[in-house]
Image (cartoon, grey):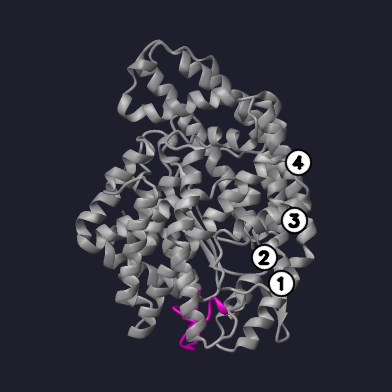
Amino acid sequence: MESKEITKPVRQFLPQEITIDSWAKIETYYKDLEKRSINSIEELKKWLLDRSELEAVLSEDMGWRYIKMTCDTTNEELTKSFTFFVEEIEPNIAPYSNELNKKLVASPYLSQLDEKSYHIYIRGVKKALEIYREENIPLQTKLSTESQKYGAITGAMTIEWKGEKITMQKAASYLKDVDRNVREQIFNLIQKRREEDKDKLNDLFTELVKLRHQVALNAGFKNYRDYKFAELGRFDYTVEDCFSFHQSIAKEILPLAEKSSMERKKALNLETLRPWDMDVDVEGKPALHPFDTSEELINKSIECFNTIRPLYSRVLNIMKSMGHLDLESRIGKAPGGYNYPLYEIGVPFIFMNSVGAHRDLVTMVHEGGHAIHSFVTRDLEITDFKSFPSEVAELASMSMELISMEHWDVFFKNADDLKRAKKEQLQDALKTLLWIAAVDKFQHWIYENPTHSVDERMKGWENVINQFNSKVVDWTGIENVKSRSWQNQLHIFEVPFYYIEYGMAQLGAIAVWRNYKRNPEKALDDYEAALRLGYTKSIPEIYKTAGIEFNFSQGYVKELAEFVKSELDKI
């Protein structure tokens, strides 16, 4: 799989080159699919392939618009290009997609499609038909454009440190400084800057909640949470299962976090443990610095992946050679990181904000896991088979965080630094589970109470976060920082309810890593076999193929937590 082999497949339905600058250029293909006669199973399969090609082309065109906009949020032309697609193309697609779904479900040849491959796809199509409402199209368009304002607001945030204007990502790296005065100053500067946009973000979120609630009502749902479960195709677990997840995490993971906080407080010899004390090395060592430049990050990641399996390093090599990486943090760049799947060419794009920190290494291998997933499914028959639910997508990425950890000597030549990195990774995995549970539980409250006030929202978050926060950490005098800390989470604004999947996948990843520790080759074979399924099986079936359980009962969470604790004790 060399880069010269990676080209877009020859199109069978659309022209080889097409510039999407008007709806008229696209509508003719939708009309063809809508009016085409289907008189055999072969014709139905051809129809599905043509529809899939059209969807892949449009998805990739939209993808590049989003990628370019997030790489430079200050460029108005890039924002206009993205907005054009959202406002002029997507709203026109929706009614046609609904009609094509009706056509597919009504086809007398539907039952002749391979049940093993198409069952998951068909159940998703039927659910989409159930919740489709034409009056929601303009609301969805507005939601798409409004939610992107979050990236523009937060991407413009900077602080001044020692005469230099730095991004929030860069500023956060100073929270690992061994000088406590530096950490406190940086923390306060970050929070002061966030406070400036607190009301702006609250106003934006109030509007998003209002729009989302109306979408739910239009579709016949009591609240947006229930609508979103249907839209996300959550066939394999329920709202009650999410509550079970919250409870299991609070009961089994929080005590480990509390213990860790007590050990940190003692090791740092502090009377009170403050939020700015949570990232510094307890032995007073400077922050881990696994690389200097983005070039070094990608080259070391390629080397690391090669020690796991050569296929994985080829994935990153191809992306590097094709220019499908933008890794460095800079002013005007949207926050966060992502792996954007590009369904037609099958080579995704990795975006992140690296500043040389250990967390950047973790982000890189995480997104690299997503990239592997994209590559091993690029030849699946239709686009929807490659559009996996997040519970599966995040299993691919979070498993790679832990698997690659066994090969981080590429980044850390010093044995003590390697131990610190592994310990930090495992402690972060536990902290992440607590934050995920809090964010998800908060979103349930938000949409069950859609008419809440801003003050009620802040208090609602405080009530939730206190259920998952270590009581050892002292927030005295900065309670306002805690009450608005939910604003730091992009997902709440841009992709509501897409977050608990990380927690479910984190549990799965721990189980995959446990298998890898026991039998590396078999664990990787099972991991890859699960990934290659794409979304042609249910989530529990995919997890089972990976050699693990899709399970968030208290007993199972306890079992995995004890395994992580035992591994921490060995370091």
Work out whether 458 lies above or below 177: above
Q: How far across and how far down the image is residue 193, in percent?
A: 74, 70
> Which one is earlier in the sequence, the residue at label 3 or at label 4?
3
Residue identifier under label 3: 201
Q: Which mark is residue 478?
A: 1
> Which one is earlier in the sequence, the residue at label 4 or at label 1?
4
Q: How far across and how far down the image is residue 451, in percent?
A: 75, 41
Residue identifier under label 2: 482
What element does badge 1 sit on? loop
What element does badge 2 sit on? helix
Work out whether 558 lies above or below 147: below
What element does badge 4 sit on? loop
Name the kind of residue labelled 3 in the image.
Answer: Leu
Whether tag 3 and tag 4 are in contact, CB under 8 A, the answer is: no
Query: Which residue: 56% across, 86% down?
Result: 270
Residue identifier under label 4: 451
Query: Which residue: 66% across, 32% down?
Result: 216
Asked if residue 287 lies in the magenta stretch, the reply is yes
Query: Which residue: 34% across, 52% down?
Result: 556
Give the magenta part as a residue range: 277-293
